[in-house]
Image (spheres, rainbow, N blue to C red):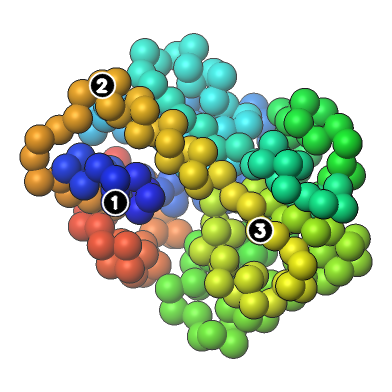
């Protein structure tokens, strides 16, 4: 959101964390699809957004097509950055670091077939790290953050990858630790710029606001909503609003 907000500060940004159903990565596809379609219907009704960015790789690869069939609203999905990774990988050995669902999805397999046929893509999922970022990251020490990436660092060394795709939006928060903790030859790729440019294009198509803008953080309740969400909202200069569904 920061990337788009810097370029269109006059817009209003509404971020909703689905704390009531977190985490998605261990759920079956049918359940994820049902949750996402139902939740987005409530979000759209309450907040009336211009566009929706589905800021989750798992939700995107499982439910994006169904969302576009269900709601008349522009959607931007977040999918693993396989295409740019394949372009920059010199050794053609790529690591995909994502959730269990994302690494196993047919959508992901099709991305690899379409854009990385000449590469070997090694897949690595670490569900506990998603939990760490969601619940502990705002309060974690530098040592905890450094230690949290040991698993993916060992994976990269074992499979000798030269490019690592961050295929989960939670893992982007660990960018500084990954840059320091991974071997120096490894390039890290995410979908930030591609998603941001698509969001900018769609917002401009809808008509840009002329106001002062604003950023607001909502969640969907549940045990995963406190106290980490107020801390995240403060870190990214958003006004914390609490449970959208209450």
**Picture coordinates of residue 227 (x, y %)?**
36, 69
The picture places residue 174, in percent across and down from the top left corner, at 57, 67
Residue drawn where x is 54% and y is 18% of the image? 66
> Which residue in the structure is indicated by mark 3?
188
**Depth check, front residue: 164 or 61:** 164
The answer to whether residue 65 of the structure is visible from this angle is yes
At mark 3, the secondary structure is strand
Within-10-Å neighbours for mark 1: few <14, some 14–19, many 20+: few
* Res 97 quadrant in image: bottom right
The residue drawn where x is 39% and y is 67% is: 228
Q: CA distance from mark 1 to mark 3?
A: 22 Å
Mark 1 — residue?
6
Q: Residue 218: which disc?
A: none
Q: Position of residue 191 (x, y in %)?
A: 56, 44
Which mark, by number, is residue 206?
A: 2
Measured in 3D between alpha carbons, the distance from the residue under mark 2 to the one under mark 3, in whole angstroms, is: 33 Å
Q: Which mark sits nearer the N-terminus, 1 or 3?
A: 1
Is 204 situated left or right of 182 in this image?
left
């Amino acid at each position: 959101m920061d990337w788009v907000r810097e370029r269109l500060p006059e817009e209003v940004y509404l971020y909703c964390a689905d704390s009531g159903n977190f985490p998605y990565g261990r759920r079956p596809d049918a359940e994820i699809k049902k949750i996402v379609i139902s939740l987005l219907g409530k979000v759209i009704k309450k907040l009336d957004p211009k566009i929706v960015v589905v800021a989750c790789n798992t939700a995107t690869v499982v439910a994006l097509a169904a969302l576009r069939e269900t709601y008349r609203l522009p959607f931007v999905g977040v999918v693993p950055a396989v295409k740019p990774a394949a372009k920059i990988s010199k050794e053609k050995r790529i690591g995909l670091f994502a959730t269990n669902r994302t690494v196993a999805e047919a959508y992901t397999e099709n991305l690899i077939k379409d854009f990385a046929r000449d590469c070997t893509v090694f897949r690595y999922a670490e569900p506990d790290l998603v939990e760490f970022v969601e619940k502990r990251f705002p309060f974690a020490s530098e040592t905890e953050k450094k230690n949290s990436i040991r698993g993916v660092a060992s994976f990269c060394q074992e499979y000798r990858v030269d490019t690592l795709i961050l295929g989960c939006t939670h893992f982007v928060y660990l960018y500084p630790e990954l840059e320091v903790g991974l071997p120096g030859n490894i390039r890290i790729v995410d979908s930030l710029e591609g998603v941001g440019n698509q969001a900018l294009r769609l917002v401009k198509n809808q008509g840009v606001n002329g106001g002062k803008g604003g950023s607001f953080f909502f969640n969907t309740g549940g045990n995963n909503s406190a106290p980490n969400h107020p801390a995240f909202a403060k870190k990214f200069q958003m006004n914390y609003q609490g449970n959208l569904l209450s």
